[in-house]
Amino acid sequence: MPRAFTPKVITASDLLEGDVIYLTEDDTWSRHLTEAEVIDDEAHAQIRLLDAQSQPDRIVGAYLADVTIGANGPEPAHFREAFRATGPSNYNHGKQELAG
Amino acid sequence: MYRYSDFDAAFVAERNKQFRAQVDRRIAGNLTEDEFKPLRLMNGLYLQLHAYMLRVAIPYGTLRSAQMRQLAYIAEKWDRGYGHFTTRQNIQYNWPKLKDVPDILDALAEVEMHAIQTSGNTIRNVTADHFAGAAADEIADPRPVAELLRQWSTDHPEFQFLPRKFKIAITGSPNDRAVTKAHDIGLRMVEQNGEPGFEVIVGGGLGRTPMIGKVVRDFLPKADLLPYIEAVVSVWNTLGRRDNKYKSRIKITVHENGIENIRELVEARFAELRPGFSGVDQEILRDIEAQFAPPAFTARDTDGFTAFYDNDPVFRSWVDTNITDHKRADHAIVTVSLKKQGDTPGDASADQMRLLADLAEKYGYDELRISHEQNVILPHVPRADLPAVHAALKAYGLATANIGLISDIIACPGMDYCALATARSIPVAQQIATRFDELKLEHDIGALKIKISGCINACGHHHVGHIGILGLDRAGVENYQITLGGDGTETASVGERAGPGFAYDEIVPAIERLIYAYLDVRDSSEETFLETYRRLGMAPFKAALYPEAAEKHAA
Ligand code: HEM
Ligand code: SF4
């Protein structure tokens, strides 16, 4: 049996701001992980990654990140992605600041 | 202090103009990221976890107050109101926007600063003893030589695409405060029969394969420095491995070829290069030396200082930990701690930077230094003015009396900022500092260096910490490995791994057990942690770190 595919989102850094962004289903970029398109098969993941990488004047360094599915949509599977989705732990800067 | 020549100013202005055009082309979509990345790295611009990061060089750690004020202005205008001082005598801004970076670089150029060669496979910012020009134990001020090396290496055509980055550190004192043995080249000023020269150390480095540098030449006359260094870099440029980035640093070249072979090759290359150096470099050096002439010190009496010292215990404690002897008895070197317990090591707010600039201007002949231990130094303060300086620092949360103590921790940015990190380091530093402050044990523990890195690259120097902490990712959770017995001074050694790592919430209690074990087994309060470790070895510390294992063993 093939291994179950871990759901993924596509994430990158915004070219101008440098902050963390996520690819949505309608091909825009969101600053909120909850709005990201959740991808659950490998072939689609590769196609969406190509879609993302074809926007080099908008984003930098697109890649696939594992997520789990929670009550409000995708949540980071790994602590690195949790920090990217939140901000640094020593100051209330980054995304957590927007969340208020 | 060194001032830019017309050549320096024109060079930096030209580079800034080029970079502005490169940024414009990137934003307009005419450069891909693959094309742009090496260009931005050459100008100190990284892309980190949450934002861009700009790394600004502070050559040999020396700043004038006008430069410090400009750093504060940049922090406020284009960043989040603070800067992070690093172990490489740089300042990093964690939140710049791409379109603002050319303006920031222009603002830096206004005060003769830049971000060139803070990245990439070039000869990096030359670091120097932060007490240079002030220390009582100094043979000569090493900064003119550091500046000569900077001029020689900047944009040197042979050395723009080296196998890897190349870092040089220099000290003018027998007490090595510049970690020279953990650099690609370390230079220690020495004298032989009254003639000044250098002991040249090569092949030190930290990272995934830590190595203590080896002496390649025990006495190099001062006038031979540039051709000799060029010979070292040239031999490595030829032999150094470009096939594997983990084997590319000179430490591996020295390790694989042996120091004897390297010495022979370097001497042969040196013999070829030496005649090409007609002495112009020595003339330039003399000009540079004139610019580093010591300030016109004013003689001051120290009675007021002594009275204060005797009567104010808070002031006394600060003087005892944060003040170092100056070459003049009526002056002192002040180390200002950027490590207030619970704060982020190395961070300074714009207000704090401005205060430091004001103090340097008013009491310190306009000079400031940044140490590789992430603190700020006022190198020349009349002892008579220390009470006023202390009071001013206190008002800005900068009077923490902890230099060289357990809360004076070096921590790299780690997972809170760094794209390469495998775990956090800043909060671990904050928690250790806070915990020992609560226990009121800090001064009792005495001299102790804890250094923390958030991945194997070792930017936090953990290998040379008396206690080193390395944050790793073990199956998706943060895990911290402890090393013991590291030392970054003239008695350099690489720390030894104590055993299995600890989870994030176990690391502070583990350090606490370690410290209690030290307090138990030390000879006297005079014996430092490192001395105790060197006398007794790993056993008592291992038992304290892993009590279950010790019990099992006993059963
Ligand atoms: C945050 C962005 C940073 C990145 C991406 C980064 C990257 C790296 C890498 C890849 C290495 C290993 C180089 C090698 O072994 O060839 C390294 C080494 C080093 N870094 Fe950083 N670093 C960063 C921040 C810092 C900071 C903030 C400091 C100072 C606190 C620092 C100081 C050092 C030092 C001293 C080494 C030397 C280790 C050696 O000798 O190999 N780095 N860095
Ligand atoms: S040691 Fe690792 S985590 Fe820390 S700054 Fe260097 S590269 Fe980043």
Image: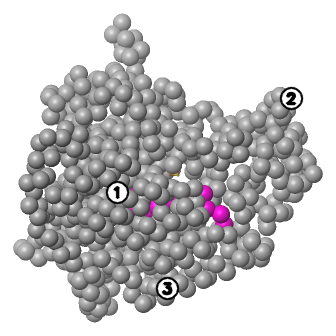
Q: Is residue B11 above or below residue B344?
A: below
Q: Residue at x 14, y 45 (%)?
A: B309
Q: Badge 3: how crowded within 10 Å, few (<14), some, or many (20+)? A: few
Q: Badge 1: how crowded within 10 Å, few (<14), some, or many (20+)? A: many
Q: Is residue B357 above or below residue B49?
A: below
**How much space separates mark 1 and mark 3, taking CA atoms?**
29 Å
Task: Output the chain of dot 3.
Answer: B
**How much space separates mark 3 and mark 2, taking CA atoms?**
63 Å
- Check if mark 1's residue and mark 3's residue have beta carbons within 8 Å: no
Ligand 2 within 8 Å, label 2 CB: no
Query: What is the span of residues highlighted in magenta in the rendered image?
Result: B87-98
SS of the residue under disc 1: strand
The residue nearer to you, when weighing A90 against B509, is A90
Q: Is residue B205 visible?
A: no
| Image quarter of residue B5 | bottom left
Quickly name the residue at label 3. B11
Quickly name the residue at label 2. A1
Under mark 1, the amino acid is Val
Q: Is residue B175 above or below residue B63?
A: above
Determine if the magenta segment contains residue B89: yes
A65 left or right of B275?
right
Q: Nearer the viewer, mark 3 or mark 2?
A: 3
Q: Quadrant of the C terminus of chain B?
A: top left
Residue B129 picture location, percent across and down: 28, 62
Residue B498 picture location, percent across and down: 38, 31
Q: Earlier in the sequence, mark 1 or mark 3?
A: 3
Q: Nearer the viewer, mark 1 or mark 2?
A: 1
Q: Nearer the viewer, mark 1 or mark 3?
A: 1
Quickly name the residue at label 1. B376
| Image quarter of residue B447 | top left
Task: Output the chain of dot 1.
Answer: B
The residue nearer to you, when weighing B370 against B297, is B297
